[in-house]
Image (cartoon, helix red, strand yellow):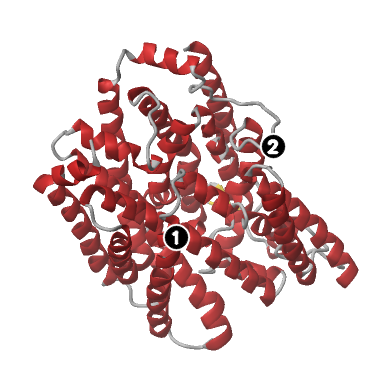
Amino acid sequence: MFRSEIVAAFGTLNWTILIVYILGNLLLGFVLSRRVTSAEDFYLGRRATPWWAIGISVVATYVSALSFLGGPAWSYSENLAVIAIHLNYPIVIFLVITIFLPFFFNSGVASIYEYQERRFGPASRSVMSGIFLVSQGLTSAAILYATALVIEFITGIDVVQAILVVTVIALVYTMLGGIAAVIWTDVIQAGVLLIGAGIILVALLGELPAPLGEVLGELKAQGKTTTLDFSFDFTREATVWSGVIAMTLFHTTVYGANQMMVQRTLAARNIGDAKKAYLMMGFAAFFIYFLFMFLGILFYAYYQGAGFENGNTIILQFAAEYALPGLMGVIAAAVIAAAMSSLDSSLNSMATVSTVDFYQRYFRRHEDGAHYLAVSRGFTVFWAAAIVLPAILYAQSEGSILQTLSRIGSYFVGAKLSMYGLGFFSKHATEKGVLAGVAVGFVVIWAVATQTDIAWPWYCLIGGTVNVAVSVAASRILDGKQADWSPYTVRGQLRRFAEEGRPLKDGNWYAVPGKVDPVAYALLGFFVLTLLFLYGFDSLI
């Protein structure tokens, strides 16, 4: 079916579904705006959001339209082994709730980069905040493009016009309702996303050219069902080693050192709720990503490996051809929902960092909450406008947008990983040293990316290793040995709790970093089970 036919077939029912969904999001943002009276309400939602809503929001934010569109496109062009990039979430969440989250939650901060100032100094805080704004701006632009691609595909509206429309929609409800609007709209968006994916899976299974067992057998013969690639070829993106080693470090920075992800957990009632919200991602992510990758190889069988002008439209093409009344409206709403769940989070977190880490820190330190609320809303508008141009530039890319986004993000994670890792575990690291490490690390990653064929998942490990080595050496050279552990290291926090007689636990959950909650060990067991499942899946076909 040609795109002109798809546009013509969209119809009244599909438009009704899509418009009702969009209006519902705007209405929810307006309703929640009545509870936003200060900057703290905008950033943290009065710390009254239930953990399950935060957990769904965490899942929905990272499992975005980039996954809904880009996941099937990636496995369609390669094979099921690309799931390796997303195997690591149980390990990642184990590390984040054990080490990262207690530092941020106990401090009561709105911006997690304030930790950098407490541990090292104001310059490191500004550098880390700046890195976040640049990297998140590029990420947001990719998300915006993904959504505009759907609108263009199904309506015929020019992609630039679609980008502007989506920006305005996300901007309005995010600016009105703050983090509460972000979380609660994410809950709705997650439901729409999973319903859409489920409908597509059921429909696709019914349209396959042969029974599922036969189809999988043919796909295996073509190498499409390979799930675990143990190759030591560092030029290949999706191997078990890149997924378990390199991408564990990558995703640890995404969930542990990224304002967009951590900010919503800071809106929880207590640290136990914050950890439970993250645990949901640790257990759910594998199933969601496997679903998207599995759809990709089934599409390969359905379309017999045919080429697409833009692989990111495969799922839309199928939905249009299937012609179930209302399906295109649900799928369009699902993809827009997935994208909005990430875009609203990006805008809110970038506005928070801009206000707290720059405006309030350097320009107006002693204003009231209403003033900072107005400034935060102003920065929300600014960042919505700023991401439009790079979103238009993404439209020139025809590869998987999930793959493209991951590659871009890999340039920045080494710096984040090293600055937080040294902050948590190093006695002698100093601000001058870590900034020197960040500078050298960026140069090395640029050289690796432009002068070698090493795949992007390894950039985090390479950049992080260089950052740590240079930072430690530079700290000793420039500032010498430090006499004592900083209170903002893991060891310093444990000592501080002991000296102040504070309980190590808040209820049944450890409040101090470095202590493992018993339920966290289940994440490691679950990780082993996912490996066994993937091995069995390919072996038993």
Q: Is residue 256 visible?
A: yes
Estimate the spatial distance between the alpha carbons at disc 1 and disc 2, rounded to whole Å. Answer: 29 Å
- The residue where tag 1 is placed is 393
Amino acid type, mark 2? Phe
- The residue where tag 2 is placed is 234
Earlier in the chain: of badge 1 and badge 2, it is 2
User: Circle 1 — which element?
Assistant: helix
318 displayed left or right of 75: left
| Residue 495 x/y as whole percent | 74, 60
178 displayed left or right of 271: left
415 displayed left or right of 350: right
Query: Answer yes or no: do the residues labelled 1 and 2 have beta carbons within 8 Å?
Result: no
Which residue is pictured at 62% across the width and 44% down the height? 457
| Residue 512 x/y as whole percent | 63, 55
301 lies above or below 112: above
Which residue is pictured at 42% across the width and 60% down the height? 391
Which residue is pictured at 43% across the width and 81% down the height? 372
Q: Is residue 511 visible?
A: no
Amino acid type, mark 1? Leu
Q: Nearer the viewer, residue 144 or 448?
A: 448
Q: Nearer the viewer, residue 296 or 101?
A: 296
User: Circle 2 — which element?
Assistant: loop
Give the quadrant of the N terminus.
top left
Which residue is pictured at 34% across the width and 26% down the height? 303
